[in-house]
Amino acid sequence: MRTNDEIIDIINNLKEEKGLSLSELARRVNMAKSALSRYFNKTRQFPLNRVEDFAAVLGVSSEFILGFDTNSDKNDITSIYNELKPPRQEVVYKFAERQLQEQNEKPKVVKLPITEEDDEDVELVCGHQSAAGFAMLGDDSNMTSTVMKASKVPNGADEIVEITGNSMEPLIMKGEQVFIRHQPSVENGEIAIVAIFDDGITCKKVYYDDAEGTVTLESVNDEYEDMVFPVEDIRIIGKVLGK
């Protein structure tokens, strides 16, 4: 198995071969650009539980990134494990344990086609606008509601919001509408409509830093810098479910 520095070097080389910028790679693996930069600077240990995400984006296998020789006669995982020293065995064991747990927790979902009779009407709030760029002040004066067919609406959506800026392009284009579910928090890397106290409302990827007590609001568009606020200065309005 490769060392931490070797894993980073392999990922960096693959990134260059694919012609990906740091921002684009961070977006594709759903990680904060600032966090990925620290891994590339080798100031932090690469998270082995994310190796499959990087492998999928970079078009290689997890084994290749980790340094397991898939062409070797010793391709049996037990043989590889036994050759490792105890500290590295523990890393591999924990990684394999997590993979097994994730595999067992993902049941197969079979979606049945929706007939016209089953396609119910769903009422959604609309009229809000959110900047994808610098925050804009909210205005509830134009709030109305609209009715759409359930098959056109992501499950759990409460509202349609118009995006007025370009900082989330090309993922969300200026002028597009997104469906959101009203909720007070999101997971790291999820896109949300966020209210910034005394500043306005914006659409961004959200990353929490519990150690610093801050929240980073990250754009997809490289022209925009990350915005960092104390946790108490922002409020999550809702999670973006889709367009």
Image (tube, rainbow, N blue to C red):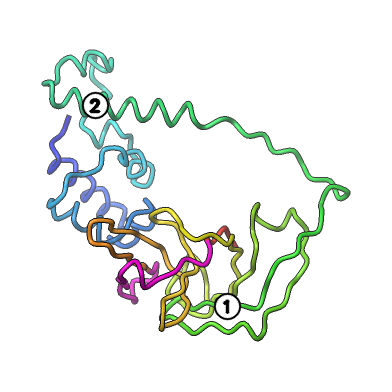
Residue lying furthest front in this view?
A: 232
- Secondary element at tag 2: helix
Q: Nearer the viewer, residue 125 or 47?
A: 125
Q: Residue at x 56, y 30 (%)?
A: 107
When the figure is inspected, residue 28 is found, relative to residue 179, above or below; the finding is: above
Q: Is residue 195 left or right of residue 109?
A: left
Q: Which residue is the site of mark 2?
A: 92
**Mark 1 neighbour density, 10 Å: few (under 14) some (14–19) many (20 or more):** some
Q: Is residue 145 left or right of residue 63?
A: right
- Report x, y in % for residue 118: 84, 47
Give the CA distance from mark 2 to mark 1. 46 Å
Q: Of marks 2 and 1, which one's residue comes earlier in the chain?
A: 2
Rendered view: 235 above or below 32: below
Looking at this view, is 27 or 98 the one in front? 98
* Dot in front, 2 or 1: 2
Name which residue lies at 23% across and 15% down.
74
Which numbered dot is residue 175? 1
* Range of residues picked out in magenta: 219-238
Residue type, numbered disc 1:
Gly
- The verdict on residue 220 being magenta is yes
Is residue 114 one of those drawn in magenta?
no
Q: Is residue 133 left or right of residue 173?
A: left
Q: How many marks?
A: 2
Circle 2: residue type: Val
Q: Secondary structure at mark 1?
A: loop
Residue drawn at (72%, 57%) of the image? 152
Residue 49: image location, x then y, percent: 31, 38
